[in-house]
């Protein structure tokens, strides 16, 4: 059994503060250790259930957050930016299952801890074939395009609820309950990691109950940006078209291309956003 594990940071046990998410922030180094520990819990559960190969991808920000010196030595780790499949780098048709660890709710979800979609403020909403979509749905769709089911999602209460609505009978572990975007009632990390390990093993021992999340092609990615200039700049890319004053769309029969183009659009949108910060 081959297992793919995508690990984000906002939904990691014990973390609630934006400073804990970025390298220059107070608490970031400890955040990286907790991120690694949550990942290790999922990896341990996978091997406990009979996995023979586990690949972990660092899916947060710089993608250089998981401690390579602390990750479970039985797995392999993908880290570093500029990769075609972004948060899904490393997954393939040969995988039997995917797990999402440390994920968060999409932008605007009430009580979603550190809720956002792909970027902190630049992207107001993301759409997949006309439906509002967060990172859970986006990467689940990538996995589904390869025939791989998502069997476990861990994160805050709002993220887990989002996963269940989207994926149905998926194992979830709620490691914290949001009070506001930047505050939560959290489980002690050791307890949360014990729950993650048990849920990972439980899911993989009952693998036949899960089905891939399939989005029918062609795939249309839509983005509502925070400003008109972000949309205008992104629409200069061949194949990307304006869909509104602050919106763009891109359509492809290749889900991998959707992921790659999203990464390019995010780079452009982020650059434009930084240049105009004085206007919010």
Image (cartoon, rainbow, N blue to C red):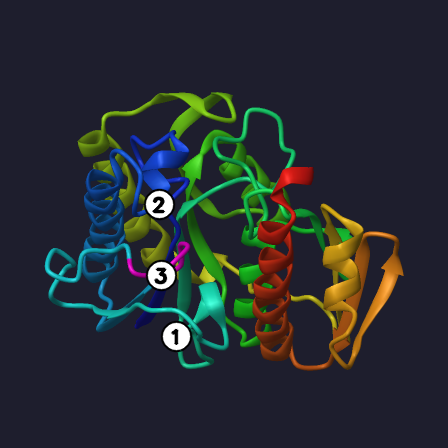
Magenta span dominant secondary structure: loop
Give the x, y percent position of residue 277: 61, 43
User: How far apart in space, not on screen, are marks 1 and 3 (Cα)?
Assistant: 13 Å
Which region of the structure is painted magenta? 58-64
Q: Quadrant of residue 66?
A: bottom left
Q: Secondary structure at mark 3?
A: loop
Q: Which residue is mark 1?
A: 90
Q: Is residue 80 left or right of residue 249?
A: left
Q: Work out whether mark 1 precedes mark 3 in sequence or the reverse, and give the earlier one.
A: 3
Q: Which residue is mark 2?
A: 22
Q: Residue at x 50, y 73 (%)?
A: 85
Q: Work out whether mark 3 precedes mark 2 in sequence or the reverse, and give the earlier one.
A: 2
Q: In this view of the protein, which residue sits in the foreground, 77 or 167?
A: 77
Q: Residue at x 16, y 58 (%)?
A: 71
The quadrant the N terminus occupies is bottom left
Q: Which residue is mark 3?
A: 63
| Label 1 crowd bin: few (<14), some (14–19), many (20+), radius 10 Å | some
Labels 1, 3: front one? 3
Q: Is residue 252 left or right of residue 275?
A: right
Residue 280 shows in the view: no
The quadrant the C terminus occupies is top right
Q: Residue at x 49, y 41 (%)?
A: 104
Labels 1, 2: front one? 2
**Is residue 63 highlighted in magenta?**
yes
Q: Secondary structure at mark 2?
A: loop
Q: Tags 1 and 2 in contact by the CB under 8 Å rule?
A: no
């Amino acid at each position: 059994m081959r297992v793919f594990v995508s690990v984000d940071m906002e939904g990691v046990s014990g973390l609630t503060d934006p400073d804990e998410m970025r390298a220059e922030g107070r608490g970031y180094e400890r955040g990286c250790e907790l991120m690694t520990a949550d990942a290790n819990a999922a990896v341990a559960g996978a091997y406990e259930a009979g996995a023979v190969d586990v690949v972990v991808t660092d899916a947060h920000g710089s993608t250089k957050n998981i401690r390579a010196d602390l990750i479970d030595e039985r797995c392999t780790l993908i880290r570093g930016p500029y990769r075609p499949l972004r948060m899904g780098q490393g997954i393939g048709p040969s995988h039997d299952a995917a797990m999402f660890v440390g994920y968060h709710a999409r932008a605007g979800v009430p009580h979603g801890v550190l809720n956002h979609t792909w970027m902190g403020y630049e992207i107001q909403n993301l759409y997949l074939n006309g439906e509002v979509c967060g990172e859970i749905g986006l990467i689940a769709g990538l996995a589904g395009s390869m025939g791989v089911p998502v069997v476990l999602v861990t994160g805050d209460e709002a993220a887990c609820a989002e996963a269940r609505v989207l994926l149905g009978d998926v194992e979830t572990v709620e490691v914290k309950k949001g009070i506001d975007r930047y505050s939560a009632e959290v489980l002690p990390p050791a307890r949360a990691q014990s729950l993650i390990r048990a849920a990972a093993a439980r899911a993989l021992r009952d693998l036949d109950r899960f089905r891939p999340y399939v989005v029918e092609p062609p795939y249309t990615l839509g983005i509502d940006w925070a400003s008109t200039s972000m949309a205008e700049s992104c629409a200069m890319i061949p194949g990307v078209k304006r869909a509104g004053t602050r919106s763009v769309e891109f359509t492809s029969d290749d889900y991998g291309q959707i992921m790659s183009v999203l990464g390019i659009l995010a780079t452009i949108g982020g650059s434009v956003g930084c240049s105009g910060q004085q206007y919010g």
